[in-house]
Amino acid sequence: MATLAPKRYQLAIGGEWVDSAEQETFASLNPSTGQPWYEAARGTAEDVRRAVAAAKAAFERPTWRDMTQTARGKLLRRLGDLIAENAELLAVAEATDNGKLIREMRGQLAVLPEYYYYFAGLADKLHGETIPALRREILNYTLREPVGVVGAITPWNSPLLLTSLKIAPALAAGCTLVIKPSEHTSASLLEMMPLFEQAGYPAGVVNVVTGFGHDAGAALVAHPDVTKLAFTGSSETGSRIAAQAGARLARVTLELGGKSPQVVFADADPHSAAMGIVAGVFAAAGQTCVAGSRVLCQDAVYDEVLERVRERAARIKIGDPLDPDTELGPLALREQLEKVRSYVRIGRDEDRATLVLGGGVPEIAARTGGWYFEPTIFADGRNDMRVCQEEIFGPVVTFLRFRDEDEAVRLANDTRFGLAAGVWTRDMARAHRVASRLDAGTVWLNTYRAMSPMSPLGGFKDSGFGKENGFEVMREYTRLKSVWVNTSDEPTADPFVLR
Ligand code: NAI
Ligand code: MG
């Protein structure tokens, strides 16, 4: 397997690797050991200014501005090919940086190029329309144009994928980007940077300023030349960014948190439901925005489904994320370990839920220094408990009971979030009926965590607004201009003579 030696990464601005203006760096830690493994440049407002200037110049330069849409598609296709060729390096970088399983990263990198190919295909299918007018001699048409410089701010839980959801459509539209990756997980994106040049992108089309949210991130949000902000992360930060973007009338899309329900009806296949629940909350150690962290079970199957989930979760193989046999790796950040631990305390002492599995740090943590946490299950949950209302973002799930369909829908929707939901039933009429009643941007029926570049992704309520993926996302990266043409040869009449 490829391994990555400790490195010192710089900022990627205007096609060059450069130090931060203040020459400062910060260390990123390896979650499997708790030890530093690379240094990245600590970008500040001055670096953001340089990067935005580079992105703006690249946006206006003929090499990019006048490139045909078909040529833009070809570049994206080449980029997808290069990602496929460098998949192992990128997978190892992210697994080392974030603690994500190498087996999950290999799977993710096997499909990530498809996201680039999809948007490559869309690049020359974007067009305006001709529109009827109230006067015969008028030709009216629209032009669909790129919005300009995009500021992308991304989180640590799935850096390459979540950043790609912004890069691919922005480049298909003809925008340029400044990306501020999470200070906890910048390595995989930095390892990907050379691929843009190899694919043939002009310098400055994609820029990366590593650093912290409160300085580099905030400077990107505030910069007047950043026309659109694409953010994924916590609802608290998203709300702050939306307010600041609103103050200067910048466009913004927000992919935020969730407290997604998995609803299991008595007629569901209990084995499939249990496997879907395990995958929904223990994959990626529960550090996904769509984690199915509340399980609503109909009375008749509650005990059986809980027991099946407990039995499988108890056998989850905790270990080194770089070992392909590992099923659960460490949490990505030390702060996250503390947060998960505190929620287990809240669930037990404050909410008085019943702890039926886990709740602690496994033995491997002391041996390796890694930020591991056991798969944890609470039973006897009530929806008003904090563990049922607040995003934990870890391998913790709470089971609740319901009597009938109306109660299931009411409990499922009774949260500030509206990102995703799973429904397990063999009654197809009920499945579609419940899907239409759920307040969630994505509903999975008898499956969970399915995703594709073709399908719109994005939440309702405090889970954010705007979509990623699908044709719909192109509206977020383009603007529509209406052009009016007088096709008459008649001289323009005197405006003050009424006809
Ligand atoms: P965060 O939402 O604060 O950070 C996400 C990104 O925003 C990072 O790149 C960060 O540097 C940047 N940022 C932070 N403050 C900013 C500001 N004022 N202006 C501009 N950019 C800013 O998330 P964080 O601190 O990494 O994690 C906190 C909690 O958020 C986690 O415990 C987890 O529960 C939740 N979270 C949820 C995610 C989701 O996809 N739903 C993703 C990441 C975190
Ligand atoms: Mg790290």
Image: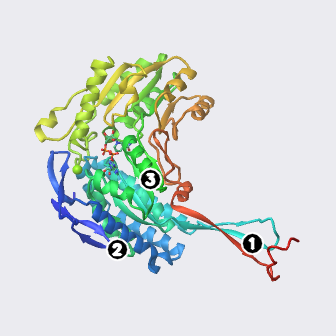
**Decide: marks 2, 1 in contact (CB < 8 A)?**
no
Judging depth in this view, the residue of 317 and 216 nearest the camera is: 216
Mark 1 / mark 3, whichever is N-terminal: 1
Judging depth in this view, the residue of 476 and 269 nearest the camera is: 476
Marking on residue 198: 2
**Residue 285 visible:** yes
Residue extending farthest left: 367
Identified by mark 3, the residue type is Ala
Question: Dot 3 lies on which element?
Answer: helix
- Horizontal relation, residue 51 to residue 374: left or right: right
What residue did someone put label 1 on? 139
Place of residue 230 in the rendered image (x, y in percent of width and height, measured from the top left): 43, 54
Q: CA separation, marks 1 and 3?
A: 36 Å
Q: Quadrant of residue 380?
A: top left
Marking on residue 30: none
Q: How many numbered badges does the structure rendering display?
A: 3
Mark 2 / mark 1, whichever is N-terminal: 1
- Horizontal relation, residue 161 to residue 127: left or right: left
Graded by Cα atoms within 10 Å as few (under 14), some (14 to 19) or many (20 or more), the crowding at tag 1 reads some
Q: Nearer the viewer, mark 1 or mark 3?
A: 3
Q: Residue at x 31, y 60 (%)?
A: 189
**Residue 357 visible:** no
Place of residue 479 in the rendered image (x, y in percent of width and height, measured from the top left): 56, 63
What residue did someone put label 3 on? 245
Asked if the beta carbon under badge 3 is closer than 8 A to the nearest atom of ligand 1, the reply is no
Q: Residue at x 43, y 27 (%)?
A: 295
Q: CA separation, marks 2 and 3?
A: 34 Å
Mark 2 / mark 3, whichever is N-terminal: 2
Identified by mark 2, the residue type is Gln
